[in-house]
Amino acid sequence: MTRPVTVGMNNTVGSVAAAYWGAREASLRDAPLRLVSAWEWQPYSRASLDSNEMAEQWSRRVPVETAAELRGRYPGLDITAERLTGPPPRMLCRAAAESQLLAIGVGGLGGRTGFLGGSVASATVSVAERPVVLVGRRSAERGEGEERYDDASGDEHPGPVIGDPVGAGPVVVGVDLGRPSEEALGFAFEAASLRSARLEVIHRRHRPPARDEEMLQSTLAPWFARYPDVAVREHSAIGKPARELADAGSGAALVVLGLGTRHHLKGVARLGHMNHTVLHRCSAPVAVVPRR
């Protein structure tokens, strides 16, 4: 059975954009689309009765309504919607474990808030065992103009503007030549192949150029053989690779980052300075791919 593309829906303005991104991704992968919302009743000391009830109503209503709209746009796509009860990071990680990837919508983009402005997104990225794609509201555009929806607070927000949610630009991947992530490279090559897009490989220059080039070609050789249809452009970043990755991602369909295996004492993976910087600066969807 084909694993689904799962979208974790929440009450951010990027949530519905993530659902549209996930629908196109599922269509590209010929996979089912699973929309999930994770809801947990908050103690009265942390949330009022009204806010609890609004959040609960949102978690029931919006995924179902979004699934109905997506079925109209993608009539051949198998789409399900369900609500999970429990701590959102834990529920989303469980859903991710059963999926090809998990997409999460986030409300903030850019230097001030970034993708990790929400604790749920940050916690999920840190512990999920499958790729997590963070999709901001500006990552997608809807052709016929804006629509509006209500979030859990009862406020009305502009809906995502969606035309081609996957984007027409290249796929960008960051590579550490000292310890390259095969998982991130595999995800990036597959994403570029599915989109018939160019793959841009960015790595930090810290050896003589000839040595860097030799190591890069050795790292990429198996993937060239597996994905001969993918055109690759290589670029060595001088100075701050995180900034170059974020800048390259401004016109990209997807930016792919690897997540290392170093952990905090509580078992939460360290994102690392470069990943953290890219996640806070990049305006394209960003896939964080853990090592197995």
Image (cartoon, rainbow, N blue to C red):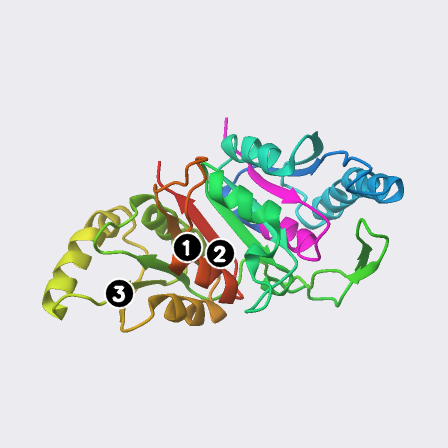
Q: In the picture shown, does residue 1 fall above or below 243?
A: above
Residue 154 on the magenta segment: no
Q: CA distance from mark 3 to mark 2?
A: 19 Å
**Residue range (magenta):** 1-23
Residue hosting label 1: 256
Q: Are marks 2 and 1 in contact (CB under 8 Å)?
A: yes
Q: Which residue bears the numbered disc 3?
A: 204
Check disc 2 and give the amino acid type: Val
Of residues 21 and 261, the one drawn nearer to the viewer in this rendering: 261
The amino acid sitting under disc 3 is Arg
Q: Give, as a three-letter code, the residue at label 1.
A: Val
Crowding near pointer 2: few (<14 within 10 Å), some, many (20+)?
Answer: many
Secondary structure beneath label 2: strand
Q: Which residue is mark 2?
A: 286
Question: Which residue is painted at 65% across and 49% down in the image?
Answer: 19
Percent position (x, y) of residue 278? 45, 62
Q: Is residue 70 left or right of residue 241?
A: right
